[in-house]
Amino acid sequence: MMRRSDPRRVGAIDRAHTDKRGGGDYRRRRVSWPQAPRRELIRQHTSRLVALSLLTLLALLVTGCGLPGTIPQKGRIPDAGPSPTATPLPPITFPQDEAPHRDLTEWWYYTGHFHGSDAQGKAHEYGFELTVFQTLRGQVPPFYAAHYAISDITRGEFHYDQRVALGSLAALPEPGSTDGFDLGVQDWRVKGLNGADTLSATMSEYTIALNLKDALPHPALHGGNGIITLGQAGYSYYYSRPLMSVSGVIQDHGAQIQVTGQAWFDHQWGNFISLAGFGWDWFSIQLDNRTEYMLYVIRDAQKKPISVFGTAVDADGTVSEIPAQQIETTATGSWTSLQTGGVYPSGWKVTLPSRDVALTLTPALLDQELDTAQSTGVAYWEGAVRITGQAGGKPITGAGYVELTGYAQVPSGAQRPTVP
């Protein structure tokens, strides 16, 4: 488990933080083996070769500067796999598209906030992230990675862990399955169907067992029809359940705390790839008037925006697109990671003129960076934020999450993953 702690980080924005990090003799001999031992020897040798090949592939999967859950590429996909999908693409259907697909890249992503009181009556506030990535390349077994993070806002600490596993192509559901998803990566599991989900994950001092229920009548399709473009990287299906109620238990340093709160769920998949330097800023916004917003600013290797998407979800579940020209996000400060040296935006002004919305997003903790060298091989910032501002001329508050990718790389020489 990785740990960051500093009580001074809580609710603050570091606007001026600029720290830097800084020959033998070989002879051939013919050996005659009995038939049965030879078969066993070949079987063992083949098993070792397969295991070595998978581990070699795994090392390749986490080399470079990609995005969370994607295989970094230097401009093109390997010949072993299919090429990025061209339009037109078939529409999303439910519940069939909740299940795993047979595309290059896919993830199921939860972020949210919950709170509760311990046996002594002390209040505790948390942010959380739990996500599972599935990566397919040709006939190689599926590679799964998972990230789990707790922003312990009460303690002013950020903790995270990661898992990896190899799956089976035969275990993937057939197209059209209506069974939803049930994904286990070692001892972590996410399961969902029709907006009723269960999550479980554990790391040192923090174990969660949560039940989630969609509070809205249907998922939100982004891009109008659930398909967005990632520029040269390809196309992606993308929908969200932007307001899910949360109930369950967290084991916090041995104390069992009943918690309630709200979460945001993303499901994204397609034959897209991660090009070198490619990144994005992603915002999930949940306002206290039960209005939700998703903002997605995708950048190229020069950090210039190449696609901007926005989705608004009203209290009754009505979904509408926000035109790119009606989305304004401005960083109000920066934060420099002592772990990776990456310089991230920190704090934002978000203005949506067509919705008469002006918001300030403040990180609940400054350091909410994940170094995932042991799973997906990237460094990114994924953090809980507090929200204040105005909507329709009235004061408004809320909570959200921000994801920042492409600003940092894992330190050189970092430990690479091993599959159990």
Image: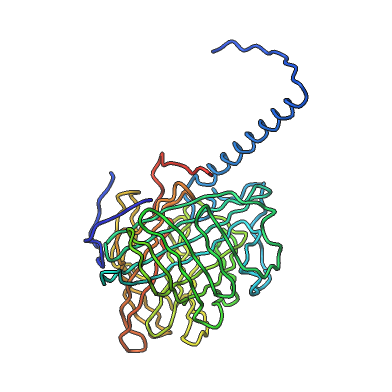
Position above or below: 410 against 273: above
Q: Residue at x 64, y 48 (%)?
A: 141
Give the farthest residue toward the right: 35
Position above or below: 415 against 369: above
Position above or below: 224 against 67: below
Q: Position of residue 395 (x, y in %)?
A: 30, 86
User: Which color mode does the image show?
Assistant: rainbow
Quarter of the image for residue 40 reads top right
Q: Position of residue 282 (x, y in %)?
A: 44, 67
Left-right relation of 414 to 122: right
Question: Nearest the camera: 171 or 409?
Answer: 171
Q: Residue at x 59, y 75 (%)?
A: 194
Q: Position of residue 179 (x, y in %)?
A: 65, 68
Q: Residue at x 59, y 54 (%)?
A: 135
Q: How many marks?
A: 0
Question: Nearest the camera: 139 or 3?
Answer: 3
Give the farthest residue toward the front: 119
Q: Residue at x 43, y 58 (%)?
A: 148
Question: Nearest the camera: 279 or 291?
Answer: 291
Q: Position of residue 28 (x, y in %)?
A: 68, 13
Left-right relation of 62 to 32: left
